[in-house]
């Protein structure tokens, strides 16, 4: 496997790598948040929001470059789909943090911690995967690991919701947790979308 | 109306037909489930999950083939959009079954049965429609019927939600039903998306 | 900046302008509805549903034309994405109106009024923006204003949800408002998607 690109196309890879880094950072803040004392929620949430804005800016830079370029390292459409999917991951991490603040939650519970930790692992795999886009040797093990982690997240989500409906008797508390679990599960879903798009790009250029 | 394709392109039609069959099967299990005794929910849900995995595999086969092909029977983009929409139908059927199990529902009620039955009718129309993709004579009546059935599902959903908020006084029970109705209504929505995509493909090649 | 198109391609611009007008109308009805006496909800909701159908018809006309055209004023893919995003705005306005009726709400509260009014402002900006698609001089100020308004909507949403979870003790009432706020916030999100797509189209043709 091997690509060969013009220097100016390297910008795309640089931008993608930067997005990978930002997503890792956001996911680390998310774990920090769910393990923090509730007093710290708002400050950590603000850091995640900042990461989310950085991701938006990178998305904007990539799409602007895309609209101005005749030559792109891989299909225009694929670059666009990938950048949107990466941005979605960050959006969901931010939405999770935001929900915790909006709902004024006083603890997030073991399952949300579990989902946040899997999200962090996924973010690291995504970061490794986008860093390999230029020369995708060794890509496959990251793709496989992302699918494995997404299944793990899915299992946590299923158990979390089941337990919630079994044990929680206060409906408003139940609503808060249900929403939080759904957002975090969506974050992990989008990580899998990223893996699917990357797999598809690599296949085309193999 | 008529297409003419190379032998190797037939694979796409075969895969689409297989997806149609799997969706019909999943929808039949869904009806079986909503009409079953609650004791049977888990086992039937497992069968639906299996169908959903089969749909995932077919999606993967089609997108892999797509990434390796120079020649495709219709626009690459359309094939991709269609396969994702078909996969979504199966995903929502699975999500509905899963919700019933996760929420440990003891009955699903007449409206969920109604929505499941419309979904089964839609699945059969979709199956007929994808089978005609190669030679789309007679396609139109399936497209029309899908739109009609989706409207029917919409009416059931509207009534179901209205009644739920009128009669159900237990908030947690209300949450369960609201979610189930929404998932099933989403399944029927995605069936309409499939019809729109197919209509668009046929128009281009007319 | 300046495009030059063949006469027959003008149809696209006409259709987009018509969609812009319909969206403005739907957003005006929405404001009328949230400020109306509950007795008026159903009648106004029916007017919104009619606008939504008009939007569907225009979507269908544009996609049909697209599938029959060799020459399009800008990328086929972009036209399709734009029309779907415009249709989504109208769908969410309709979904908001519908929720008010389905949940038999007796008042919608100050935050829903605020979100409806921002949606109306956004609809007007969208209408101005699509009217400029043919000659995008002066486009930028509308794009900037849409982003500003979407941030405003986001702030209202955040406050609305926070207040709701702080003050509302009846879970079923809370569910109704939460859903309504989410739908309206989604409507404003889709307005921002429209702005992003338009910005991208203009950049390509600059």
Image (cartoon, coloured by chain):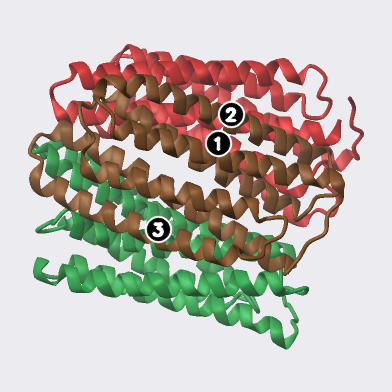
Chain colours: A red, B brown, C green
Q: CA distance from mark 3 to mark 1?
A: 20 Å
- Dot 1: few (<14), some (14–19), or many (≥20) neighbours within 10 Å? many
Dot 1 lies on which element? Answer: helix
Q: Which residue is mark 1?
A: B22
Q: Please, is residue C162 above or below residue B152 in the view?
A: above
Q: Are marks 3 and 2 in contact (CB under 8 Å)?
A: no
Q: Please, is residue A108 above or below residue C188 in the view?
A: above
- The quarter of the picture where the C terminus of chain A appears is top right
Q: Quadrant of residue C139?
A: bottom right
Q: Are marks 2 and 1 in contact (CB under 8 Å)?
A: yes
Q: CA distance from mark 2 to mark 1?
A: 7 Å
Between disc 2 and disc 1, the foreground one is: 1
Q: Which residue is mark 3?
A: B149
Q: CA distance from mark 3 to mark 2?
A: 25 Å
Q: Are marks 3 and 1 in contact (CB under 8 Å)?
A: no
Chain under numbered label 1: B
Q: Is residue C198 visible?
A: no
Q: Is residue C130 visible?
A: yes
Chain under numbered label 2: B
- Name the residue: 28% across, 75% down: C47
Whole-percent x, y for residue A181 in the image: 36, 26
Same chain under badges 3 and 1? The reply is yes
Q: Which residue is mark 2?
A: B54
Q: Answer with mark 2 or mark 1, whichever residue precedes in sequence.
A: 1
- Name the residue: 57% across, 57% down: C196
Dot 3 lies on which element? Answer: helix
- Name the residue: 56% across, 44% down: B86
Q: Quadrant of residue B204?
A: bottom right
Dot 2 lies on which element? Answer: helix
């Amino acid at each position: 496997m091997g690509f060969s690109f013009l220097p100016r196309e390297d910008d795309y890879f640089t931008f993608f790598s930067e997005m990978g880094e930002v997503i890792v950072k956001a996911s680390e803040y998310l774990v920090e948040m769910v393990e923090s004392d509730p007093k710290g929620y708002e400050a950590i949430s603000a850091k995640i929001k900042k990461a989310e804005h950085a991701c938006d800016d990178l998305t904007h830079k990539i799409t602007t470059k895309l609209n101005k370029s005749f030559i792109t390292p891989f299909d225009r459409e694929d670059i666009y789909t990938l950048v949107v999917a990466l941005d979605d991951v960050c959006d969901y991490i931010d939405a999770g943090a935001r929900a915790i603040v909006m709902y004024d939650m006083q603890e997030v519970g073991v399952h949300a911690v579990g989902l946040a930790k899997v999200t962090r692992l996924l973010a690291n795999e995504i970061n490794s995967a986008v860093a390999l886009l230029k020369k995708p040797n060794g890509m496959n093990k990251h793709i496989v690991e992302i699918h494995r982690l997404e299944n793990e997240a899915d299992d946590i989500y299923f158990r979390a919701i089941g337990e919630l409906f079994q044990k929680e008797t206060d409906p408003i508390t139940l609503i808060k947790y249900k929403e939080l679990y759904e957002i975090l599960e969506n974050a992990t879903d989008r990580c899998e979308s990223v893996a699917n798009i990357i797999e598809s790009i690599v296949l085309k250029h193999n």
